[in-house]
Amino acid sequence: MRLELGKIPIRNVEFGPATKVENGTLYVNKEELRALILEDKSIKSCEVDLARPGEEVRIIPVKDVIEPRCKVSGPGGIFPGLVSKVETVGSGRTHVLKGAAVVTTGKIVGFQEGIIDMTGPGAKYTPFSQTYNVVLNLQPVDGLPQHDHERAVRLAGLKAAAYLGEAGKNVEPETVEVYELGSYLETAAKYPNLPKVVYVYMLQSQGLLHDTWVYGVDAKRILPSLIHPNETMDGAIVSGNCVSACDKNTTYHHLNNPVIAELYKRHGKDLCFLGCVITNENVTLADKQRSSSYAAKLAHMIGADAAIVTEEGFGNPDADLIMNCNKLEDYGIKTVLITDEYAGRDGASQSLADVSPKADAVVSTGNANELIDLPPMKKVIGDASAANVIAGGFAGALHDDGSITAELQVITGVNCELGYSNLRATGY
């Protein structure tokens, strides 16, 4: 597959009479976008707002973040199986509104949702304080069941991102990046002397609003599968979960997976990137055993010498992470894990719920339990009281002056286990 990503830098966002991109500004027709979202009769109201870097704005509770993209040429469309028809994506040309994002908020769906501060100490911890955000404040119709509520909010964000992405279809990109990988046999034969590396991409799939979608299919329903890395850049994988905000892989993260980007960057230089195995994170022991065995088998079948494994979430999924590690290592595949830690507010507790002596190469994306004080903001989009109930918050987390004291895990993307984070580690 060969995919061209045309990057169109967005340096400002404004409301205007027509949705378009002009001189680096994304203009949004608020009423047209709002009308599109309200086509879904399960949504009672939709307010469209803007949040720019440096503004005294807090968005809470954040459900998802999505980057606007559109297909310019090639098969399929953005977000296949959900917004566009089901067709294999990852080839042709796609335009990206780089620097823009759609953020969904409103009535809380699940307690594990997050916060984006556009300035202040919290802004340092989330990459989405640096994006020009079109925020959808969504309220469901009365009595809508929780899973239907999640579905409505998820689809609203995807439709908005696809709508905004179309504004860049006929705009000349500032840069065009090319991503190309052939078949496994072709790729391995091309670089016979380089180590063959596979990426094992764990997707949250525990149910109860802990879901990820692949071509419109709930990842709980899949066995581990081979997927071309280019497919992720066209929206084949989208978020539908409410895991803790700090390590939830939003749809934006799936579209911009830094592990895939780095493997492409090093492909043909010091490694041979074979591609991706996607696997799920299950609840029952039998399902965990089945998926971890199947994922390791696929990596072995395509000839991997080494694997990078990324987790999503914590606690229960730590068991999946360690099972994947053990079984890959049993095949002789050298394995590196990327995970965050829940080591207590003092950092003195056990970081993961499961361990193994074979997990001897681990990259940490930080401790989610550390406390942070977030000052009040002049403007809140959404509902500030959610700070008292979201994961990492607690009763009394929201103070009378609008400030918040909570654990880092309330901040969207702070401990992203794909490495899309502002946290950095220092070795001694």
Image: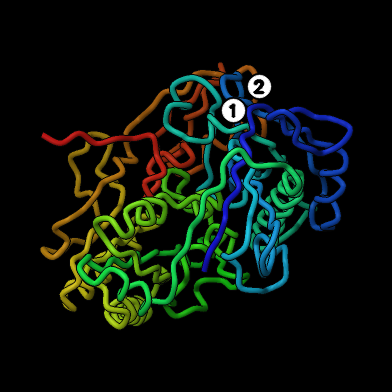
Whole-angstrom CA distance, mark 1 to mark 2, is 6 Å
Classify 54 as above or below 137.
above
In which quarter of the view is residue 46 placed?
Answer: top right
Residue drawn 60% across and 68% down? 89
Residue holding disc 1: 58
Q: Secondary structure at mark 1?
A: strand
Q: Secondary structure at mark 2?
A: strand
Check disc 1 and give the amino acid type: Arg
Q: Position of residue 156 (x, y in %)?
A: 72, 52
Residue drawn 69% across and 63% down? 77
Q: Nearer the viewer, residue 297 or 189?
A: 189
Check disc 2 and give the amino acid type: Lys
Q: Nearer the viewer, residue 180 or 260?
A: 180
Label 2 near label 1: C-beta < 8 Å?
Answer: yes
In this view, which residue lies farthest toward the front?
Answer: 190
Q: Position of residue 140 (x, y in %)?
A: 76, 51
Residue holding disc 2: 379
Classify 13 as above or below 79.
above
Residue drawn 41% across and 52% down? 261
Q: Nearer the viewer, residue 74 or 338?
A: 74
Query: Quick check: can you spot residue 143?
Result: yes
